[in-house]
Image: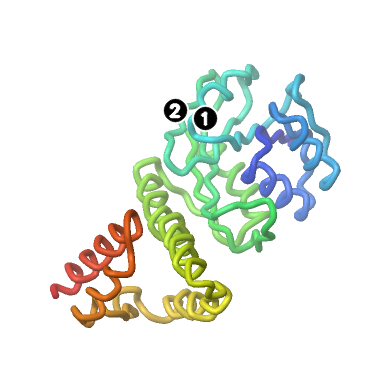
Amino acid sequence: MQIVIIGSGNVAYHMAKAFSLKKIPLLQIFGRNGEELKKISEELDVPYSTEHLEDADVYIICVSDNSVENVSKIITKKDALVAHTSGSLPKEILAGEYRKSSFYPLQTFSKSKELEYEKVPFFIETENEEDKQILFDLASQISENVMESNHEKRKYIHLTAVFACNFVNHLFARAKEVSDSQEIPFDYFLPLIDETVKKIHEIEPKAAQTGPAVRNDLRVLELHEQLLKDESLEIYKTMNHSIQKMYEL
C-alpha cells in the first residue's frame, strides 16, 4: 500500500515518525514548507516534495483545520482513500471524488517532545466497511487503542480534549506568569502538577478536587483576588465560580 502524508507541522511530523518506527513505508511527505519537510525527510529517511504529489493509495492530510478543504483539492486520484486528522471536521469537508475518511489521533503534538505512539488513541470514520478495515489495520500497527467514531461523537471527543489539555496548559502558562513575577522557580510546582495528573488515574476528577473554592474558604479567595489583575483575575474568578457551582457551594 502506497501512503503519502500531506503536511509539515507537528501532526505530520509525528505521524511520519510513528509510521517510520513501526516500519510502515511512506511513499512521500508533501507540503508547502520545504525547510520543515527537508528536516523530516532527513530525520526519517522519507522522500519529500513541495511540487509533485505522488500517486498513492492512501493520503493522510495533517494540516490545520482551516486548510484541510483547500489542501484536499490537490488530490485528484479518484480511487484513493483520503483521510484528514482533524478532531472537529466532518469527512465530507474533503473536496474530491475519492473515498473520504478521518484518522484522528487524540494527543497533543510538539515536534520537540517524544511520544509513546502505542498509547495514542485513534478514532476512525469511513464511508464503507472495506475502508474502515484498511484504516483500522493501519492505525493498529501504531496504537493499541483504535476505535470507530462518527463526526458527531468526534466533536465531543475534541471538545473534551480542549478542556483537558489546551485549557489546562493555558492555566500552567498563567501560573508560570505568577511565579515568574515573584521570581519563584516554576520547577517547584512540577511535583504538584505531576501528582494532580497521577491522581485522576485512580480517582474521579470531581472527587479529587481540592483548594479554597471547594472548601468555600472566602478569606483565601479574597486574598488571592487582591494579588491578581486583568485576565488572570477574571480566570481565577471564573474557575472558582465553576468549582463552587459544581459542588453547590
The structure residue drawn at horizontal position 77% and vertical position 39%, both measured from the top left corner, is: 26
- Image quadrant assignment for residue 207: bottom left
Label 2 secondary element: helix
Q: Which residue is mark 1?
A: 100
Label 1 secondary element: strand
Residue 236: x, y in percent? 30, 64
Per the model, the C-alpha gap separating discs 1 and 2 is 7 Å
> Residue 128 or 247: which is nearer the viewer?
247
Dot 2 crowding, Cα within 10 Å, few <14, some 14–19, many 20+: some
The amino acid marked with disc number 2 is Glu
The structure residue drawn at horizontal position 69% and vertical position 55%, both measured from the top left corner, is: 112
Which quarter shows the N terminus?
top right
**Image mark for residue 92:** 2
Earlier in the chain: of badge 1 and badge 2, it is 2
Q: Are marks 1 and 2 in contact (CB under 8 Å)?
A: yes
> Residue 159 or 134: which is nearer the viewer?
159
